[in-house]
Image (spheres, rainbow, N blue to C red):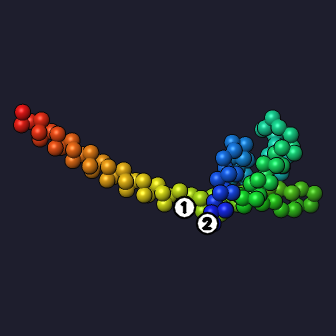
Amino acid sequence: MTPDRLDATFTALADPTRRAIIARLARGEASVMELAEPFAMSQPAISKHIKVLERAGLVSRSRDAQRRPCRLEAAPLREASHWLERYAEMMEARFQRLDAVLEGLKEKENRHGRKK
C-alpha cells in the first residue's frame, strides 16, 4: 500500500458518517438515497462523503439503468488492516519483553524481601 493510499484510507475512515456508510455497504449495495436515510443531512452532503470514500478506493459505483448503486471495495480495508497488524505484532513483542523484565524484577524483589 502506498503512503498516499494509506493516508486516503485513514482520512476517509476518520469520519463517523463515512464509517457508518462503510458498515451499511458491508451488508450489500445501496443507492445514495438509501445511504442517506439514517442521517440527518442532505443528499448532497452524503454524496460528498461518498466521493471521499470513492477517492480512497473504499467505495465504487456502477450503473444499473437509472440507479447508480454504491458497493464496498474491500482491498483498501484489507491493506490498512495488514499495515496495522504489522505494528500490532511489533507492539505485542515489546509488551512480552516488558512483561519478562517486570516478572524478573518482581522475582528479584521477592527474593530480596524474603532475606530480611
- Comparing 3 with 27, the one in front is 3
- Residue 82's tag is 1
Q: Residue 5 appears at what percent x and percent y? A: 67, 62
In the rendered structure, the answer to whether residue 1 lies left or right of residue 89 reads: right
Discs 1, 2 touching: Cβ within 8 Å: yes
Q: Residue at x 87, y 45 (%)?
A: 44
Q: Residue at x 21, y 41 (%)?
A: 106
In the rendered structure, the answer to whether residue 34 lies left or right of residue 86 reads: right
Q: Earlier in the sequence, mark 1 or mark 2?
A: 2
Residue 102 seen by the camera: yes
Residue furthest to the top: 116
- Comparing 9 with 20, the one in front is 9
Query: Of the residues shown, which amino acid type is indicated by label 2?
Result: Met
Quadrant hosting residue 105? top left
Quarter placement of the C terminus: top left
From the image, state whether disc 1 or disc 2 is nearer to you.
Answer: 2
Residue 20 seen by the camera: no
Q: Residue at x 83, y 62 (%)?
A: 62
Q: CA distance from mark 1 to mark 2?
A: 9 Å
In the rendered structure, the answer to whether residue 4 lies left or right of residue 70 reads: left
Residue to which mark 2 is pinned = 1
- Comparing 1 with 41, the one in front is 1
The mark tally for this picture is 2
Q: Residue 109 appears at what percent x and percent y? A: 17, 39
Could you tell me which secondary element the residue under label 1 belongs to?
A: helix
Quarter placement of the N terminus: bottom right
